Amino acid sequence: MTPTITAFERSPDGGRGLARDMQVRWALEEVGQPYDVRLVSFTAMKQPGHLALNPFGSIPTYEEGDLALFESGAIVLHIAVRHAGLLPDDANARARAVAWMFAAYSTVEPPILERATAVILEHDAPWRDERLPLVDDRIRKRLAELSRHLGSDCDWLDGAFSAGDLVMVGVLRRLQRSGLLNEFPNVAAYVARGEARPAFKRAFEAQLAVAMAASNS
Amino acid sequence: MTPTITAFERSPDGGRGLARDMQVRWALEEVGQPYDVRLVSFTAMKQPGHLALNPFGSIPTYEEGDLALFESGAIVLHIAVRHAGLLPDDANARARAVAWMFAAYSTVEPPILERATAVILEHDAPWRDERLPLVDDRIRKRLAELSRHLGSDCDWLDGAFSAGDLVMVGVLRRLQRSGLLNEFPNVAAYVARGEARPAFKRAFEAQLAVAMAASNS
């Protein structure tokens, strides 16, 4: 059965692959599962039809037969559990890969989201320039911990590429324009390794095509 | 095999159940799994021994035979998958319960963590009083969405109590002193329902006992 995901009709990132359907597309490409996409406007997202799929009124959602899911992390994990290719076979290694998924969302991403808030929502606030370096230092702390963990030998967080890497790379890509990744060359190389995967590239092109069509309409 | 978790030797919350071992204790109590606790000092948390368990140098960790895990969400999910009582039997309902776990960490908690940062780390910043209402509004948006989802009929987020509720209640409890929960009576009632569970109470008492012992030493 072909699942259907939702994505922004007009993504605020203009196709840079930062909207959260990107990780779901990437996961589906990694496991070779075709999918349909339903584009949703910002207005439709707040209507009862979409809220029944995602109580927080956002994308992505995932529909497959009787199943309706929200939260990109949960959708990626669902795909990873149902298909081969995104989780190791060994039970302990699987649990650790899932730990890295939670680490991405719960430990690494919060200061990165705080930065997005500072730059976008509080762009004109009088404290912006003085406060941003404090937020950046909180991000650096996490990047330093990731850098230490990766060391000089690790291509991925824990053995082979997994859903944990997919989600972590997705979170770290939000720092593209900040310059912070370049302060930690092995973390930047890790992100680049993720972006070099053929499945990533196919997912990226697919979401970019939507953004291009929207900007031409 | 009895698992061993780690917790703060001296928890910064003084035993209010806001340290992240609380959710792990609660999950273990819900499924009736005894556990051992190893207390860790702030110094020891940053040493190689603990960093091998948690690359971000924090608690909780979870050790069970050959398995070592970090991230409270991943540990709760591991417990929920291995034992009956925290996930529904139906596969689709299980996936939705996991979606609520990710929603707690990825969608609801970020502005709540931002508030903690604003109140604690930026307590003396000149922008504190002017900025806090902006952060509170971002939290209110999430609470309103949760409130709408719960409506007047739902005891829990999706049918019976699950690991999704356990994690969500844990996240929302961080708002205790903010007064924000009281603006959404059905969300406050939801949190109170979680806190009224016998397993929650046992977990709370266990972490409180550690804090009391630390304050008397």
Image: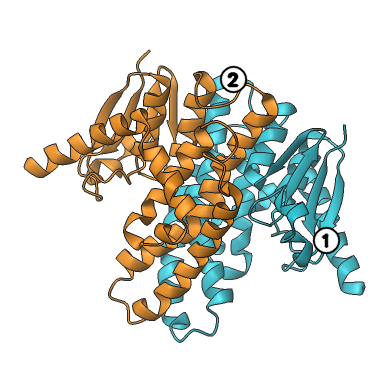
Chain colours: A orange, B cyan
> Is residue B172 visible from the viewing direction of this image?
yes
The picture places residue A197, in percent across and down from the top left corner, at 37, 32
Q: Which amino acid does the dot numbered 1 rest on?
A: Leu
Q: Nearer the viewer, residue B45 or B174?
A: B45
Q: Nearer the viewer, residue A158 or B140?
A: A158
The picture places residue A155, in percent across and down from the top left corner, at 51, 39
Kindly indicate the quadrant of the structure image that contains residue A101. top right
Q: Earlier in the sequence, mark 2 or mark 1?
A: 2
Give me the C-alpha separation between circle 2 and circle 1.
36 Å
B217 left or right of B118 in image: right
Q: Which amino acid does the dot numbered 2 rest on?
A: Asp
For residue B208, the mark is 1
The picture places residue B77, in percent across and down from the top left corner, at 65, 36
| Mark 2: secondary structure | loop
Tag 2 subunit: B
For residue B90, the mark is 2
Kindly indicate the quadrant of the structure image that contains residue B161. top right
Residue placed at 64% from the left, 38% from the top?
A: B163
